[in-house]
Amino acid sequence: RGGATEGLRIGYLPITDAAPLLVAHGDGLYEQQKLVVGRPVLFRSWSALMEAFLTRQVDLIHLLMPSAVQLRHVIGADVKVVGWNHTGGGAITVAPGITDVAELAGTQVAIPGWWSIHNMLLQRVLRGAGLTPVARTSPSRSAGTVELVVMGPSDMIPALATGSISAFTVADPFNAGAVARGVGKLHMLLDEVWRDHACCVTVVHQDLVDTRPDTVQALVDAALAAQLGIRADRTAAAALLTGNGYLPQPPAAVETAMAGTAPDPDGGPDRPRIDFHPYPFPSFTAELVRQMRQTVVDGETRFLDGLDPSGVHTDLVDDRFVRAAIDRHGGPAALGLPASLTRHERLI
Protein backbone atom coordinates (compact mmCIF):
# COMPACT_ATOMS: atom_id res chain seq x y z
CA ARG A 1 0.00 0.00 0.00
CA GLY A 2 1.35 3.39 -0.92
CA GLY A 3 4.34 1.98 -2.79
CA ALA A 4 7.98 2.62 -1.99
CA THR A 5 8.76 6.13 -0.80
CA GLU A 6 11.86 8.18 -0.33
CA GLY A 7 13.48 7.42 2.98
CA LEU A 8 11.73 8.62 6.11
CA ARG A 9 13.68 9.67 9.19
CA ILE A 10 12.63 8.98 12.76
CA GLY A 11 14.00 10.91 15.73
CA TYR A 12 13.86 9.58 19.28
CA LEU A 13 15.20 9.79 22.82
CA PRO A 14 16.70 6.58 24.26
CA ILE A 15 13.71 5.73 26.46
CA THR A 16 11.23 2.88 26.43
CA ASP A 17 8.51 5.32 25.34
CA ALA A 18 9.99 5.12 21.84
CA ALA A 19 9.83 1.32 21.76
CA PRO A 20 7.07 0.91 19.12
CA LEU A 21 8.88 3.09 16.59
CA LEU A 22 12.17 1.30 17.29
CA VAL A 23 10.77 -2.24 17.33
CA ALA A 24 8.95 -1.53 14.08
CA HIS A 25 12.35 -0.73 12.56
CA GLY A 26 14.18 -3.65 14.15
CA ASP A 27 11.50 -6.20 13.21
CA GLY A 28 11.17 -5.01 9.62
CA LEU A 29 7.59 -3.83 10.05
CA TYR A 30 8.17 -0.67 8.03
CA GLU A 31 9.44 -2.75 5.12
CA GLN A 32 6.31 -4.90 5.38
CA GLN A 33 4.36 -1.69 4.81
CA LYS A 34 6.52 -0.89 1.74
CA LEU A 35 8.15 2.01 3.53
CA VAL A 36 11.81 3.02 3.33
CA VAL A 37 12.78 4.13 6.83
CA GLY A 38 16.36 4.85 7.86
CA ARG A 39 17.79 3.79 11.17
CA PRO A 40 16.15 5.94 13.86
CA VAL A 41 18.31 8.88 14.97
CA LEU A 42 19.06 9.13 18.70
CA PHE A 43 18.87 12.52 20.42
CA ARG A 44 19.89 13.24 24.02
CA SER A 45 17.40 15.97 24.92
CA TRP A 46 13.84 16.93 24.09
CA SER A 47 14.92 20.38 22.95
CA ALA A 48 17.37 18.89 20.43
CA LEU A 49 14.74 16.44 19.18
CA MET A 50 12.11 19.16 18.71
CA GLU A 51 14.60 21.41 16.93
CA ALA A 52 15.50 18.60 14.52
CA PHE A 53 11.81 17.98 13.83
CA LEU A 54 10.96 21.64 13.28
CA THR A 55 13.93 22.07 10.91
CA ARG A 56 12.91 18.93 8.96
CA GLN A 57 15.99 16.92 9.84
CA VAL A 58 13.59 14.16 10.89
CA ASP A 59 10.06 13.44 9.68
CA LEU A 60 8.54 11.56 12.59
CA ILE A 61 9.18 11.77 16.32
CA HIS A 62 7.83 10.54 19.60
CA LEU A 63 7.20 13.56 21.78
CA LEU A 64 5.92 14.46 25.21
CA MET A 65 2.20 15.11 24.76
CA PRO A 66 2.25 18.47 26.62
CA SER A 67 5.15 19.53 24.37
CA ALA A 68 3.03 18.70 21.33
CA VAL A 69 0.37 21.07 22.68
CA GLN A 70 3.08 23.70 23.17
CA LEU A 71 4.46 23.21 19.64
CA ARG A 72 1.00 23.74 18.19
CA HIS A 73 -0.20 26.60 20.34
CA VAL A 74 2.94 28.53 21.33
CA ILE A 75 5.26 28.04 18.38
CA GLY A 76 2.41 27.67 15.90
CA ALA A 77 3.92 24.59 14.29
CA ASP A 78 1.51 22.77 11.99
CA VAL A 79 1.89 19.37 13.60
CA LYS A 80 -0.42 16.44 14.17
CA VAL A 81 -0.50 13.71 16.80
CA VAL A 82 -1.38 10.48 14.96
CA GLY A 83 -1.28 8.02 17.87
CA TRP A 84 -0.03 7.22 21.33
CA ASN A 85 3.25 5.37 21.73
CA HIS A 86 2.51 3.92 25.14
CA THR A 87 0.88 4.39 28.53
CA GLY A 88 2.75 4.61 31.84
CA GLY A 89 6.46 3.90 31.95
CA GLY A 90 7.50 6.92 34.01
CA ALA A 91 8.43 7.10 37.68
CA ILE A 92 9.80 9.23 40.48
CA THR A 93 13.22 8.01 41.60
CA VAL A 94 14.74 9.34 44.83
CA ALA A 95 18.13 9.19 46.51
CA PRO A 96 18.53 6.00 48.58
CA GLY A 97 18.23 7.79 51.93
CA ILE A 98 14.87 9.42 51.17
CA THR A 99 11.81 7.65 52.54
CA ASP A 100 9.13 10.34 52.25
CA VAL A 101 8.28 13.00 49.66
CA ALA A 102 8.37 15.65 52.39
CA GLU A 103 12.15 15.10 52.62
CA LEU A 104 12.54 16.68 49.17
CA ALA A 105 11.89 20.12 50.71
CA GLY A 106 14.86 22.42 50.21
CA THR A 107 16.36 20.33 47.40
CA GLN A 108 16.53 20.25 43.61
CA VAL A 109 14.58 17.64 41.65
CA ALA A 110 15.23 17.00 37.94
CA ILE A 111 12.53 16.86 35.28
CA PRO A 112 12.99 16.06 31.56
CA GLY A 113 11.13 19.17 30.38
CA TRP A 114 8.70 21.80 31.64
CA TRP A 115 5.98 20.58 29.33
CA SER A 116 6.26 16.94 30.31
CA ILE A 117 3.72 14.71 31.97
CA HIS A 118 6.52 13.89 34.42
CA ASN A 119 6.68 17.49 35.61
CA MET A 120 2.91 17.76 35.84
CA LEU A 121 2.44 14.59 37.87
CA LEU A 122 5.49 15.21 40.07
CA GLN A 123 3.97 18.56 41.00
CA ARG A 124 0.69 16.87 41.97
CA VAL A 125 2.66 14.56 44.25
CA LEU A 126 4.65 17.45 45.76
CA ARG A 127 1.54 19.52 46.41
CA GLY A 128 -0.15 16.47 47.92
CA ALA A 129 2.73 16.32 50.44
CA GLY A 130 2.38 20.00 51.29
CA LEU A 131 5.38 21.10 49.23
CA THR A 132 5.57 23.94 46.72
CA PRO A 133 7.34 23.46 43.37
CA VAL A 134 9.36 26.49 42.20
CA ALA A 135 11.42 27.43 39.13
CA ARG A 136 14.61 29.52 39.14
CA THR A 137 14.27 30.03 42.90
CA SER A 138 16.60 28.59 45.52
CA PRO A 139 14.68 25.92 47.42
CA SER A 140 13.99 26.32 51.11
CA ARG A 141 13.46 23.48 53.54
CA SER A 142 11.70 25.75 56.04
CA ALA A 143 9.38 27.12 53.36
CA GLY A 144 8.75 23.65 51.96
CA THR A 145 9.83 24.53 48.42
CA VAL A 146 11.39 22.22 45.85
CA GLU A 147 13.32 23.67 42.91
CA LEU A 148 12.67 21.91 39.62
CA VAL A 149 15.52 21.79 37.08
CA VAL A 150 15.36 20.57 33.51
CA MET A 151 17.92 17.88 32.71
CA GLY A 152 18.48 15.47 29.86
CA PRO A 153 17.46 11.95 30.91
CA SER A 154 20.98 10.61 30.40
CA ASP A 155 22.35 13.18 32.88
CA MET A 156 19.92 12.31 35.68
CA ILE A 157 21.55 9.16 37.06
CA PRO A 158 25.01 10.79 37.40
CA ALA A 159 23.43 13.86 39.04
CA LEU A 160 21.60 11.67 41.56
CA ALA A 161 24.78 9.70 42.21
CA THR A 162 26.76 12.84 43.03
CA GLY A 163 24.00 14.30 45.18
CA SER A 164 23.45 17.42 43.10
CA ILE A 165 19.76 16.45 42.92
CA SER A 166 17.69 14.57 45.48
CA ALA A 167 15.32 12.92 42.99
CA PHE A 168 14.27 12.85 39.37
CA THR A 169 11.21 11.97 37.36
CA VAL A 170 11.60 10.57 33.87
CA ALA A 171 10.78 7.70 31.57
CA ASP A 172 12.40 4.31 31.89
CA PRO A 173 14.93 2.76 31.62
CA PHE A 174 16.56 5.58 33.60
CA ASN A 175 14.55 4.83 36.74
CA ALA A 176 15.42 1.13 36.50
CA GLY A 177 19.01 2.10 35.70
CA ALA A 178 19.39 4.19 38.85
CA VAL A 179 18.06 1.33 40.96
CA ALA A 180 20.35 -1.18 39.22
CA ARG A 181 23.38 1.02 39.93
CA GLY A 182 22.37 1.45 43.56
CA VAL A 183 22.28 5.24 43.35
CA GLY A 184 18.50 5.61 43.59
CA LYS A 185 15.33 3.85 44.57
CA LEU A 186 11.91 3.82 42.96
CA HIS A 187 9.52 5.99 44.96
CA MET A 188 6.45 5.54 42.80
CA LEU A 189 5.30 4.91 39.25
CA LEU A 190 3.56 7.88 37.66
CA ASP A 191 0.78 5.53 36.60
CA GLU A 192 -0.25 5.59 40.26
CA VAL A 193 -0.94 9.33 39.88
CA TRP A 194 -2.79 9.22 36.54
CA ARG A 195 -3.89 5.77 35.52
CA ASP A 196 -3.00 4.73 31.96
CA HIS A 197 -1.77 8.20 31.01
CA ALA A 198 0.09 8.76 27.77
CA CYS A 199 3.51 10.32 28.05
CA CYS A 200 4.83 10.20 24.49
CA VAL A 201 2.85 10.41 21.29
CA THR A 202 3.74 10.06 17.62
CA VAL A 203 3.97 13.42 15.87
CA VAL A 204 4.24 14.29 12.18
CA HIS A 205 4.01 17.47 10.15
CA GLN A 206 0.58 18.35 8.78
CA ASP A 207 1.95 18.46 5.24
CA LEU A 208 2.93 14.78 5.46
CA VAL A 209 -0.69 14.01 6.37
CA ASP A 210 -1.94 16.19 3.50
CA THR A 211 0.42 15.04 0.75
CA ARG A 212 1.20 11.44 1.71
CA PRO A 213 -1.70 10.04 3.73
CA ASP A 214 -0.90 6.48 2.61
CA THR A 215 2.57 6.89 4.10
CA VAL A 216 1.17 8.12 7.41
CA GLN A 217 -1.27 5.20 7.46
CA ALA A 218 1.57 2.76 6.82
CA LEU A 219 3.66 4.29 9.61
CA VAL A 220 0.78 4.02 12.06
CA ASP A 221 0.07 0.43 10.98
CA ALA A 222 3.71 -0.53 11.54
CA ALA A 223 3.83 1.11 14.97
CA LEU A 224 0.59 -0.58 16.02
CA ALA A 225 1.88 -3.96 14.85
CA ALA A 226 4.99 -3.30 16.94
CA GLN A 227 2.84 -2.52 19.98
CA LEU A 228 1.04 -5.84 19.58
CA GLY A 229 4.38 -7.62 19.21
CA ILE A 230 5.80 -5.98 22.33
CA ARG A 231 2.75 -6.90 24.39
CA ALA A 232 3.04 -10.49 23.18
CA ASP A 233 6.72 -10.85 24.17
CA ARG A 234 8.15 -8.03 26.23
CA THR A 235 11.43 -9.82 26.95
CA ALA A 236 12.12 -10.28 23.25
CA ALA A 237 11.33 -6.62 22.63
CA ALA A 238 13.75 -5.58 25.36
CA ALA A 239 16.46 -7.78 23.84
CA LEU A 240 15.88 -6.20 20.42
CA LEU A 241 16.08 -2.67 21.84
CA THR A 242 19.44 -3.32 23.50
CA GLY A 243 20.85 -5.87 21.05
CA ASN A 244 20.32 -3.54 18.09
CA GLY A 245 21.75 -0.61 20.04
CA TYR A 246 18.58 1.49 19.99
CA LEU A 247 18.69 1.87 23.78
CA PRO A 248 22.32 2.17 24.93
CA GLN A 249 21.60 1.21 28.53
CA PRO A 250 22.27 -1.95 30.54
CA PRO A 251 20.12 -4.80 29.15
CA ALA A 252 18.91 -5.73 32.64
CA ALA A 253 17.55 -2.21 33.22
CA VAL A 254 15.79 -2.20 29.84
CA GLU A 255 14.26 -5.60 30.53
CA THR A 256 13.04 -4.45 33.95
CA ALA A 257 11.49 -1.40 32.36
CA MET A 258 9.83 -3.30 29.50
CA ALA A 259 8.82 -6.54 31.22
CA GLY A 260 8.59 -5.53 34.88
CA THR A 261 5.31 -5.26 36.76
CA ALA A 262 4.01 -3.28 39.71
CA PRO A 263 1.14 -3.78 42.16
CA ASP A 264 -2.27 -2.55 41.02
CA PRO A 265 -3.37 0.30 43.34
CA ASP A 266 -6.92 -1.04 43.04
CA GLY A 267 -5.91 -4.46 44.28
CA GLY A 268 -6.12 -6.26 40.95
CA PRO A 269 -3.39 -8.32 39.26
CA ASP A 270 0.05 -6.74 38.97
CA ARG A 271 0.24 -4.24 36.12
CA PRO A 272 3.03 -3.71 33.59
CA ARG A 273 5.39 -0.82 34.35
CA ILE A 274 4.74 0.34 30.79
CA ASP A 275 2.00 -0.64 28.40
CA PHE A 276 1.42 -0.02 24.73
CA HIS A 277 -1.87 1.35 23.45
CA PRO A 278 -2.21 3.45 20.29
CA TYR A 279 -5.53 5.23 20.67
CA PRO A 280 -5.42 8.94 21.66
CA PHE A 281 -8.42 9.35 23.94
CA PRO A 282 -10.06 12.81 23.64
CA SER A 283 -10.76 12.76 27.40
CA PHE A 284 -7.01 12.55 28.03
CA THR A 285 -6.18 15.56 25.86
CA ALA A 286 -8.85 17.65 27.55
CA GLU A 287 -7.71 16.70 31.04
CA LEU A 288 -4.09 17.29 30.02
CA VAL A 289 -4.86 20.91 29.16
CA ARG A 290 -6.60 21.36 32.51
CA GLN A 291 -3.57 19.90 34.32
CA MET A 292 -1.16 22.07 32.32
CA ARG A 293 -2.92 25.13 33.73
CA GLN A 294 -2.06 23.99 37.27
CA THR A 295 1.62 23.31 36.51
CA VAL A 296 4.54 25.59 37.36
CA VAL A 297 6.77 26.06 34.31
CA ASP A 298 9.66 28.33 33.42
CA GLY A 299 8.18 29.63 30.20
CA GLU A 300 5.15 30.98 28.39
CA THR A 301 1.82 29.87 29.88
CA ARG A 302 -0.62 32.57 28.75
CA PHE A 303 -1.54 30.51 25.70
CA LEU A 304 -3.40 28.14 28.01
CA ASP A 305 -5.85 30.84 29.07
CA GLY A 306 -7.68 30.87 25.77
CA LEU A 307 -7.61 27.15 25.04
CA ASP A 308 -10.79 25.10 25.08
CA PRO A 309 -9.65 21.73 26.50
CA SER A 310 -11.93 19.73 24.22
CA GLY A 311 -11.07 21.88 21.20
CA VAL A 312 -7.35 21.19 21.58
CA HIS A 313 -7.90 17.52 20.77
CA THR A 314 -9.80 18.29 17.58
CA ASP A 315 -7.09 20.71 16.48
CA LEU A 316 -4.01 18.67 17.43
CA VAL A 317 -4.97 15.01 17.00
CA ASP A 318 -5.83 13.17 13.78
CA ASP A 319 -7.11 9.74 14.78
CA ARG A 320 -8.26 8.54 11.35
CA PHE A 321 -5.13 6.50 10.78
CA VAL A 322 -5.02 4.82 14.17
CA ARG A 323 -8.73 3.98 14.00
CA ALA A 324 -8.17 2.29 10.63
CA ALA A 325 -5.13 0.46 12.00
CA ILE A 326 -7.06 -0.76 15.06
CA ASP A 327 -9.80 -2.10 12.80
CA ARG A 328 -7.22 -3.93 10.70
CA HIS A 329 -5.51 -5.50 13.72
CA GLY A 330 -8.43 -7.14 15.46
CA GLY A 331 -10.35 -4.19 16.85
CA PRO A 332 -10.10 -2.44 20.23
CA ALA A 333 -10.24 -5.66 22.27
CA ALA A 334 -7.03 -6.96 20.65
CA LEU A 335 -5.22 -3.97 22.18
CA GLY A 336 -6.93 -4.04 25.54
CA LEU A 337 -9.02 -0.98 24.66
CA PRO A 338 -12.71 -0.35 25.42
CA ALA A 339 -15.00 -1.08 22.49
CA SER A 340 -16.38 2.46 22.66
CA LEU A 341 -12.89 4.03 22.47
CA THR A 342 -13.96 6.33 25.31
CA ARG A 343 -12.88 6.42 28.92
CA HIS A 344 -12.97 8.37 32.18
CA GLU A 345 -9.67 9.87 33.34
CA ARG A 346 -8.49 8.83 36.80
CA LEU A 347 -6.09 11.01 38.80
CA ILE A 348 -5.24 10.88 42.49
Image (cartoon, grey):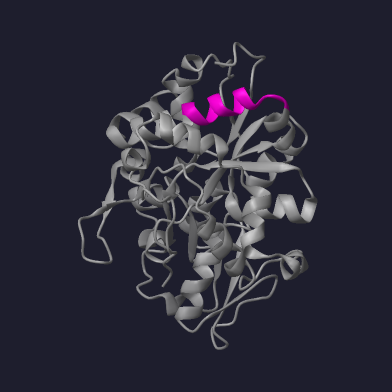
Q: Which picture quadrant has residue 333?
A: top left
Furthest residue in direction top, as rendered: 4
Q: 188 and 282: which one is in front? A: 282
Magenta residue check for 221: yes
Q: Main secondary structure of the magenta part?
A: helix
**Position above or below: 255 against 176:** above
**Position above or below: 26 against 193:** above
Q: Position of residue 131 (x, y in %)?
A: 52, 81
In the image, the segment drawn in magenta is: 211-222
Q: Residue at x 66, y 57 (%)?
A: 312
Left or right: residue 72 compared with residue 215: right
Q: Is residue 217 visible?
A: yes
Q: Is residue 247 visible?
A: no
**Position above or below: 199 against 80:** below
Furthest residue in direction bottom, as rendered: 142
**Position above or below: 167 against 251:** below
Magenta residue check for 56: no
Q: 323 and 228: which one is in front? A: 323
Q: Position of residue 283 (x, y in %)?
A: 51, 60
Counting every numbered tag in the picture gives: 0
Q: 308 and 305: which one is in front? A: 308
Q: Quadrant of the C terminus?
A: bottom left
Q: Residue at x 53, y 47 (%)?
A: 200
Q: Position of residue 53 (x, y in %)?
A: 71, 36
Q: Residue at x 50, y 73 (%)?
A: 124
Q: Quadrant of the N terminus?
A: top right
Q: Position of residue 305 (x, y in %)?
A: 74, 71
